[in-house]
Amino acid sequence: MSEPAPNTTESSAPRYVRHASGNPEVDMFRQRLARSVHDVEAWLGLVNYAKHVGDDALLHETYTDALKQYPSSGQLLASLAELELRRGNIQSAETVFNSSLFSVPSIELWQCYLNYVLKANVDAQGVVSQPERRATVKQCYKLVLDNVGCDREAGRIWADYIGFLSSGQTSAPYEEQQKTELLRETFQAAVAIPHLKVEEIWKNYDG
């Protein structure tokens, strides 16, 4: 969790109130947060401790509490959604997506959503092969790129989308032509944006 920018001042921010847990390490961080809700090192300490001991309940509690202070942190929202998905709480993860994807501009959150859609549509071999599922994934890629495709960190998503399009099977000449045209359009769109993988994508396009 990198340091997000709070949208409240210390005096107006929601207070952090948690009863003593009986765990000295957890209580140390909680005492620090009771003194200052914007003590980022204390938030990180709770997150790292919860991950280290595998305490998902504490991790969920910490993400939820931190989001009261940093409601526009895409990284926190993505971490909460990933935790919910890992715990099998699909509806809770979808609530995070539905409430935040379009109101919090965050490539981490959109990447989390994309990963969720991809995982939901792969077959037993770990690939997206069925036409209707490929259509769903294609639509998701387009939605993600329409919203965060200009981010400097979006290169991986562009490259993955190109790989996804390239893997599509065709059974007729017109389908192959459509695939080629879409790939060309996608390559051109990808290299027109100054993201971190633009040179790599350009080399693949030029080659």
Image (cartoon, rainbow, N blue to C red):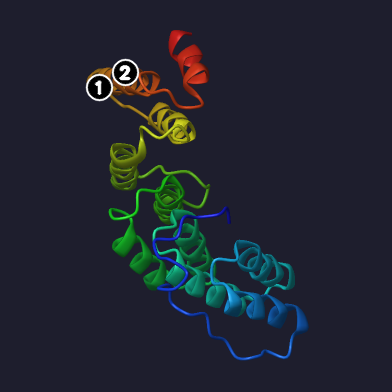
Q: Amino acid at mark 2?
A: Thr
Give the numbered dot on residue 180.
Answer: 2
Answer yes or no: do the residues labelled 1 and 2 have beta carbons within 8 Å?
yes
Residue drawn 75% across the image and 78% down it: 25
- Dividing the picture into quarters, in which one does residue 11 lie? bottom left
Q: Residue furthest top?
A: 206
Q: Is residue 205 left or right of residue 47?
A: left
Q: Amino acid at mark 1?
A: Gln
Q: Residue furthest right?
A: 24
Q: Nearer the viewer, residue 29 or 198?
A: 29
Depicted 12 relative to depicted 145: above or below? below
Depicted 44 relative to depicted 191: above or below? below
Residue 183: percent from left, percent from top: 34, 22
**Disc 2: CA contacts within 10 A as few (<14), some (14-19) or many (>=20):** some
Residue 189: percent from left, percent from top: 32, 22
Residue under label 1: 178
Depicted 156 relative to depicted 56: above or below? above
Residue 139: percent from left, percent from top: 28, 42
Circle 1 — which element?
helix
Give the numbered dot on residue 74.
Answer: none
Circle 2 — which element?
helix
Of the 4 image quadrants, the one containing the N terminus is bottom right
Q: Is residue 4 left or right of residue 161?
A: right
Q: Residue furthest front?
A: 11
Residue drawn 34% across the image and 43% down it: 144
- Dividing the picture into quarters, in which one does residue 33 lie? bottom right
Residue drawn 49% across the image and 69% down it: 84
Residue 16: percent from left, percent from top: 52, 80
